Amino acid sequence: MKPAPVPIRVRPVRAADLDRLAGIAGSLETASRWQLSDYERLIGPFEPRRIALVGEEALSGEIAGFAVAVLVPPEAELETVAVAPGFQRRGIGSQLLRDLVSALRSAGITLVHLEVRASNRPALALYRRTGFSESARRPGYYADPVEDATIMSVDLPPLAGTGEES
């Protein structure tokens, strides 16, 4: 039986969140293994620019997950969507991804790419539900264990009134 949805608030990452983000990623078999310096680049005026969001449980304020994209306008690369084990299958990843895509569109991004382990069925399903489609595969891209990467992308139509319409 699927757990009940959890109401969350989505907001930008803050410095005080970084240890929790590293803890979430460290608890997930398929999450990126970033160094602390990688997390520090999520805040502040670093280049390339990133949009990093956290989803916190509305009642307790506990951070349940996070999503990060790096911007190389007019494109972006989704670097990670990670949800803590106790919060998975409750719609948090979907909400984070929807809010991230909205923020990317507002930033003028028109194409988003991502790489995901070919065996990560929950992530593949999440991305497909959000409109991503497979565009390529990279054999042996991941290590530990060696595995193919599925490359996915989604076109983001410009927002109305931005002057970017065709």
Image (cartoon, rainbow, N blue to C red):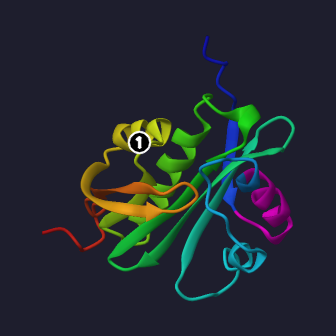
The answer to whether 4 appears left or right of 115 in the picture is right
Q: Is residue 53 above or below residue 93?
A: below
Q: Could you say whether the residue bearing mark 1 is in a helix, strand or loop?
A: helix
Whether residue 133 sits left or right of residue 63 in the image: it is left
Residue 163, percent from left and from top: 24, 74
Image position of 75 with respect to 80: above or below: below
Outermost residue, top direction? 1
Q: Residues within 10 Å of mark 1 (few under 14, many from 20)?
A: many
Q: Amino acid at mark 1?
A: Leu
What residue appears at the point 62 percent right and 28 percent down from the top-left corner? 90
Span of residues in magenta: 13-24
Q: Nearer the viewer, residue 119 or 106?
A: 119
- Tell me the quarter of the picture where residue 75 sits: bottom left
The overriding secondary structure of the stretch rendered in magenta is: helix
Specify the quadrant of the image occupied by residue 86: top right
Q: Position of residue 122 (x, y in %)?
A: 49, 36
Disc 1 target residue: 124
Name the residue located 81 percent from the left edge and 62 percent from the top edge: 17
Q: Is residue 18 magenta?
A: yes
Q: How many marks?
A: 1
Rendered-image quadrant of the N terminus = top right
Q: Is residue 33 magenta?
A: no
Judge by depth and name the residue closer to the eye, 40 or 160.
Answer: 40
